[in-house]
Image: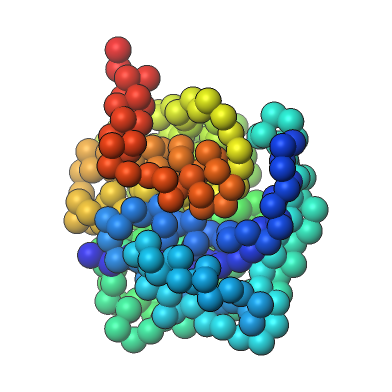
Amino acid sequence: MSIVVVGSVAYDTVETPREKRERQLGGSASFFSIATLGRSTVRCVGVVGDDFLQDDLDLLAAHGADVSGIKRVAGKSFHWSGRYHDDMIERDTLATELGVFADFQPEIPADWKTSEYLFLANIHPSLQSHVLDEMHEPRLVALDTMNLWIETTPDELKAILARVDVLLVNDSEARLLTGKRSLAHAAAAIREMGPQRVIVKKGEHGALYFGADSVLAVPAIILDDVIDPTGAGDCFAGGFMGSLAKAGADRTSGDEVFRQAMLDGTVTASFCPEGFNVEGLLKIDEAAYEARMATLKSMMVP
């Protein structure tokens, strides 16, 4: 099984109350790829500038990503800079420099178009539609979006939502998209738009799954120390999709496999804030993963 992920491969400058890191590896496709934990072949489609280090591409490749779909072009790579507040929840964006990402036109290699799974990370809805047009009947399509596209490109967003199986949004995005205050009502309204499964991310409060036959609330794992939470949402998506790919799930599968994927996404994402950039993900081994899964289940069932 293989997953095509289309999104940003970038550099982040992150300042926390304890430390500042300049131009570290970031981007939705980067976090997603490593977070699948080798459960599936991950095929990355993105763009970087001539300032992007080969060592960072090699790191992605060493952890199971096929980076041959990442184009290198003249110019600067996408760079985001942010500062976290003392609570490590709120943050201020200091700079967003799109660089070569501003002209990103995804190109799917011919032999990738039959990949079984597609994750459309947070890019313009028209680009998401273009990518889906290029694919040949994937088993499952999941999509992430954000307030910017909900507010500025609602028609394009609704057009692609009608064609996908799973939508991942945070609680404010779900309410903005639907105009519903209740998350249950918002999820129902989103399902009427197309996606039959809706995941509402609630940050430090966990995530909600609204499926075909069930609803599941998964708490966030309580961490002893939060170092850098950047990318945790993309790590959740990687763990979620990796779990589905390993199970061979498709859009007709029952809720049980998606409920398990919610747990895998939550456990995977919990490692992300324990280091800067992808450092937390790189320390995951089988024993640490299983121990944390046991912790999560104990939080849900006495």
Counting labels gives 0
- Residue 174 can be seen, yes or no: no
Residue at figure coordinates x 29%, y 26% from the top left = 294
Looking at the rendered image, the quarter that the N terminus falls into is: bottom left
Determine which quarter of the picture holds residue 10: bottom right
Q: Residue furthest right?
A: 94
Q: Nearer the viewer, residue 125 or 184?
A: 125
The correct choice, above or below, for 43 with respect to 208 in the image is: below
The correct choice, above or below, for 262 with respect to 217 in the image is: below
- Residue 136 can be seen, yes or no: yes
Q: Residue furthest top?
A: 302
Residue 173 in the figure: left or right of residue 294: right
Residue 255 percent coordinates (x, y): 25, 40
Q: Nearer the viewer, residue 191 or 243?
A: 243
Residue 246 percent coordinates (x, y): 22, 54
Looking at the rendered image, the quarter that the C terminus falls into is: top left
Residue at figure coordinates x 34%, y 36% from the top left = 288
Residue at figure coordinates x 40%, y 29% from the top left = 218
**Colouring chosen for the image of the structure:** rainbow
Residue 187 percent coordinates (x, y): 46, 40
Determine which quarter of the picture holds residue 175: top right
Residue at figure coordinates x 23%, y 43% from the top left = 257
Q: Nearer the viewer, residue 285 or 76?
A: 285
Residue 94 percent coordinates (x, y): 80, 53
Q: Nearer the viewer, residue 193 or 204?
A: 204
